[in-house]
Image: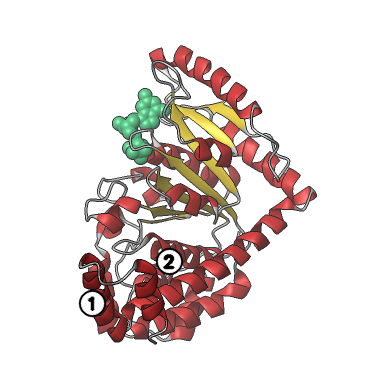
Amino acid sequence: MKSKDHDKKSALSETNNPNSSANIGKNAADKIKALRRKKIDTQSLIDEILKGNHTALSRAITLVESEQPSHQAQAKQVIDGCLPHANNSLRIGITGVPGVGKSTFIEAFGNYLINKHQKKVAVLAIDPTSSVSHGSILGDKTRMEELVKQKHAFIRPTASGDSLGGVAKKTRESVILCEAAGYDIILIETVGVGQSETMVHSMTDFFLLLKLAGAGDELQGIKRGIIEMADAIVINKADGENKIPAKKAKTEFTRALHLYPQKPSAWQPKVVLASALKNTGVDKVWKLITDFEKQTKKNNYFQEHRNEQNKFWLIQTINEHLKSNFYQHPTIKKELQRQLQLIEENKTTPFEAASYLLNLK
Ligand code: GDP
């Protein structure tokens, strides 16, 4: 573990306890306003992040999330300064439908990793619903009350009010900042909506799917792609009366997982029973993840996979950039409306209109 100076007062301090649940609930707009009021020296920010200062890390993530050009420019410098110190963590994606127990599980798992394995755990959340509406599934409730109090935990709710691509970029940059701050376990959580799982899968080393044992056919209604992405399935709430159905679900999922072709990692995904509430099974999940890490580091998949992910994100970033440059251009904004109108009046074809617009700039 790297040094940690979260408690140390510095010029960067925003609050006495930046990781308190009250602060976590504070909305991003307020934080951005606060940043506007107080310009922070970039090098001090980098230095403090590298010391593990919570407040500095929080501030840097707020810069990353800000749309303001001066903040973005500073964010870029901070990321550049942090990059040589990043990459040393295990990035774990966690998904499941609302109510499956993600926050309860992360609370139990995070506390276990900190208390038993002396890890530093950062939790980042991607909430696709908040980019569509302002109602957020992940952000609004009081979550992970115990973990929030841990000195070695950093919890950051979702970057919101943006396209999924934008949220992805912010999350990836936040991962770099957390790693530079010495967090060796990064948990990236998402709800199973839209493309958010694919996105989280493409930025993590290990992908965990949380499921519930339910009545009827366990495999009904599950997006096929998600099972394919999972490195492990945790059947949560395997407690009380639910123990027997959970065992049955485990058998069914294990059977189903064997029907898929071997993964490029050569890892055979496993199913684990857990009760996040009763704190059982988290040690088994950790054992699986460390087995996975050992195996994939030995067969080089771990590093190759990260390289592939970096290439993928390079292309994604270029695509996003080109797209936003195009749509934000004042001429395009105006002409696009006109072409849409012409299409409605049947005076042009979509292809002609697209070609006209693409050649305008
Ligand atoms: P999320 O929406 O996926 O983050 O789910 P939560 O963690 O908020 O959990 C939803 C509800 O399920 C809460 O009332 C939890 O107390 C409950 N819950 C979570 N994990 C377990 C578990 O392992 N066993 C039982 N019995 N209840 C659980």
Residue 164 is marked as none
What residue is pinned by disc 2? 170
Residue 338 is marked as 1
Badge 2 marks a residue whose secondary structure is helix
* Up/down of 240 relative to 311, above or below: above
Instruction: Decide if residue 33 is in sight here.
Output: no
Q: Nearer the viewer, residue 26 or 149?
A: 26
Residue 60 quadrant? bottom left
Q: If you read the primary sequence from the N terminus, does the residue marked by circle 2 or circle 1 appear first?
A: 2
Please tell me how crowded label 2 is: few (under 14), some (14-19), or many (20+) other residues with Cα within 10 Å.
many
* Up/down of 190 relative to 38, above or below: above
Image quadrant occupied by the C terminus:
bottom left
Indicate which quadrant contains ligand 1. top left
Instruction: Decide if residue 31 is in sight here.
Output: yes
Q: Nearer the viewer, mark 2 or mark 1?
A: 1
Which residue is rendered at x = 22% and y = 65% of the image?
344
Where residue 254 appears, as percent x and y from the top left, is 60, 24
Q: Amino acid at mark 2?
A: Lys
Where residue 231 appears, as percent x and y from the top left, is 60, 39
Q: Is residue 319 left or right of residue 149?
A: right
Residue 169 quadrant? bottom left
Which residue is rendered at x = 65% and y = 60% of the image?
308
Q: Is mark 2 within 8 Å of ligand 1?
A: no
Q: Nearer the viewer, residue 69 or 297?
A: 69
Where residue 214 appears, as percent x and y from the top left, is 40, 20
Q: Nearer the viewer, residue 205 or 313?
A: 313
Which residue is rendered at x = 48% and y = 75% of the image?
48
